[in-house]
Image (cartoon, rainbow, N blue to C red):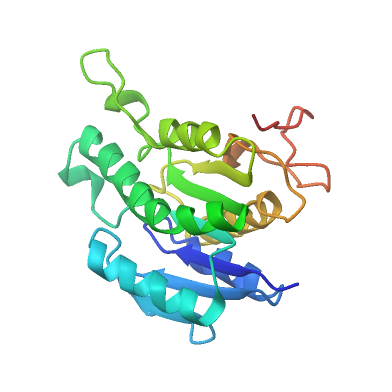
Amino acid sequence: MSRSVLVVSGASGSAESVAAAYARQDDWVGFLYERGTPPDELYNVRCDVSDGLQLDAAVSEFETGHGVVDVLVVDADRHDRYGEESAHSAAAGTRARANAIIGRTLPGMREAGHGRIVLIASTKGLGRGSALSGGAPHADLMSLAWHLVHECRGSDITVNVITYGSPEGTTRQGRAHRAQQIANLAVHLTRPEATDTGAVIPIEVLGTIPSLGPARTDGASYQGR
């Protein structure tokens, strides 16, 4: 059965691969983008997620045509150049971007009783390392995800996070491979029968993705919470 899938584009460049992967499954795919030229075959809506009015209008337009969002995949990293802002600001912006789109779509999922959410962000956007200010960590995307896991406990709504390393120095072929890894993992985590939730999965350590779950190079499997 086709599902209603909303993919939000961001700085990682993986959102188009993610959207295409769902389209190949004959899902109804909406693609929210802020810049660039999206693929013609997708249901494209230009939208600045940070603008509440634009976001509400874009999601409402999609829901009118395809119903409540069943699957939400958000590339939470912004297109801003991180070098021009503090790591703290980068992490705060990443969380705010994710919080805005989830705040608009989660009520519909909760009313329907089911939903799948995947957040994508670089480790820099998540506030690793230099993002610790004065030894005290600030709220980041992972804390948002885990908060949502507890909020949605008891319902058929899962929330997981995919992280990737810095794109600096990555070749074009490497970025394309990373985008496909992200797409495959997002589809895997949002299967109707999937139950893993609360997982934070770095794609750098992924091998193949067998039917029972994403595999690590040490042979172990990631388990949700």
Pick the residue in front: 213 or 104. 104
Image-quadrant location for residue 225: top right
Residue 90 position in % (x across, y down): 26, 41
Pick the residue in front: 106 or 198. 106
Image-quadrant location for residue 51: bottom left
Horizontal relation, residue 22 to residue 36: left or right: right
Residue occupying the far right of the picture: 211
Residue 91 position in % (x across, y down): 30, 38
Residue at the spot 55% in from the left edge and 77% down from the top edge = 66
User: Is residue 77 something one can see in this rendering?
Assistant: no
Horizontal relation, residue 109 to residue 131: left or right: right
Residue at the spot 38% in from the left edge and 51% down from the top edge = 103
160 above or below 67? above
134 above or below 88? above
Residue at the spot 60% in from the left edge and 35% down from the top edge = 153
Horizontal relation, residue 117 to residue 1: left or right: left
Q: Quarter of the image for the N terminus: give it.
A: bottom right
Residue 72 position in % (x across, y down): 52, 58
User: Is residue 66 something one can see in this rendering?
Assistant: yes
